[in-house]
Image: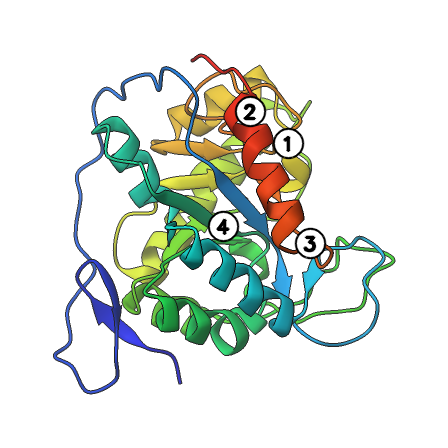
Amino acid sequence: MVAEPHRGGLRAPGEPEASPAKASPAKERPALVGRPPWTLMYHSVDSGPQDPYLLTVSPQRFAAQLAWLHRHGLRGVSMRELVLAYEQRAADGLVGLTFDDGYADFPRQVLPLLRAHGFTATLYVVAGRMGGHNVWDADAPRKPLVTIDQVRQLAYAGVEIGSHGLSHCRMTGLPEDELAAETRRSREVLESVVGGPVTGFCYPYGAVDEAAEQAVAAAGYDYGAGICHQPATSRWALPRCYVGERDGGLRLRAKRVRHALRGWSA
C-alpha cells in the first residue's frame, strides 16, 4: 500500500486526504540560464536477474545512495520542484531524483526509502504501456510496469508523474503526427489518470533533436528531461546523471564534481 498525498511531501496513511493541486499552464516559460542543478537518472530498483543494460539498482545500493545524499546535505526532490526552485534561485541543497520507464518496483522498493529520508521524486510513465512490461528492452529481463491504479496512488502520494511518451519509441526523426501522439496524447492519458497537470516529459533513450524539443514545448510541458552526455539546449532538454549499481560514495562524489565543472547555457 503506497503512502497518500501531503502538501509538499509524502503523506503517511491515516492523515487527511488532499487532492492534487490544479495548475494553469504557464503562458511563457523563462529560459534557464547557467548550470542546471544536479539531477540523478534511475530506472529500476529491485533484486533479480542480471540486467545487461545496467539499469537496475539493488534496494541495498539504492538505500546507501540516498543515505549518502542525506549525509552530504542534499535533499532529493522531484524534477518539477527542482525546476521551480531553480527559477527562484532556491535550488542550493537540492538534487533531482528521476525514474524512467515506470517500473512496478517503484511503489514497493523506492517509495518507502524516499519517505524515510523526507525525499520526493519523479516517475516517468510510458502512457500506453501501463500495466504492461518493458517490451522495448529486447535482451533484458521482463519487468512489470506500474498499473493505472498504481500511477493514481503514487500521484496522490506526492510523487510527480511525468510522461515518457506513449509507446517508448525513439523520438528523433519522427514525423510531426507521431511526435504529437507521443507528447500531447501521452499527457492527456496521464492527466486523466492522476486528475491533475502533467508538466514534465522525459525522452525515451535520451534521444532528442530540435523537432522533438519543439513538440514537447508545443504540447505544454514545463520542461523536458534528457541525459548528461548530450548538450542542453533549452529547458526542454535538461541533462541528468546516470546512476547504477556500481555507484557508491566515491563515484557519486566524482559525478557531483564533474557536474559542477560543466558549463551550460540556455
Mark found first going from the N terminus, 3 or 4: 4
Q: Can the viewer see residue 203?
A: no
Mark found first going from the N terminus, 2 or 1: 1
Q: Please state which of the two labelled residues, at mark 3 or mark 1, is closer to the viewer.
A: 3
**Residue 33 lies in quadrant:** top left
Q: Residue furthest left?
A: 16
Mark found first going from the N terminus, 4 or 1: 4
Q: Which residue is mark 2?
A: 212
Residue at point 45% right, 26% down? 236
| Front residue of 108 and 127 | 108
Q: Amino acid at mark 1?
A: Met
Residue 98 got which mark?
4
Q: Are marks 2 and 4 in contact (CB under 8 Å)?
A: no
What's the distance in space between the residues labelled 2 and 4, CA to CA? 20 Å
What is the tally of numbered marks visible in this picture? 4
Q: Position of residue 233 (x, y in %)?
A: 51, 15
**Residue 132 lies in quadrant:** bottom right
Q: Please state which of the two labelled residues, at mark 4 or mark 1, is closer to the viewer.
A: 4
Mark found first going from the N terminus, 3 or 1: 1
Q: Which residue is mark 3?
A: 244
Q: Residues within 10 Å of mark 3 (few under 14, many from 20)?
A: many
Q: Position of residue 214 (x, y in %)?
A: 47, 19
Mark found first going from the N terminus, 3 or 2: 2
Residue 105 got which mark?
none
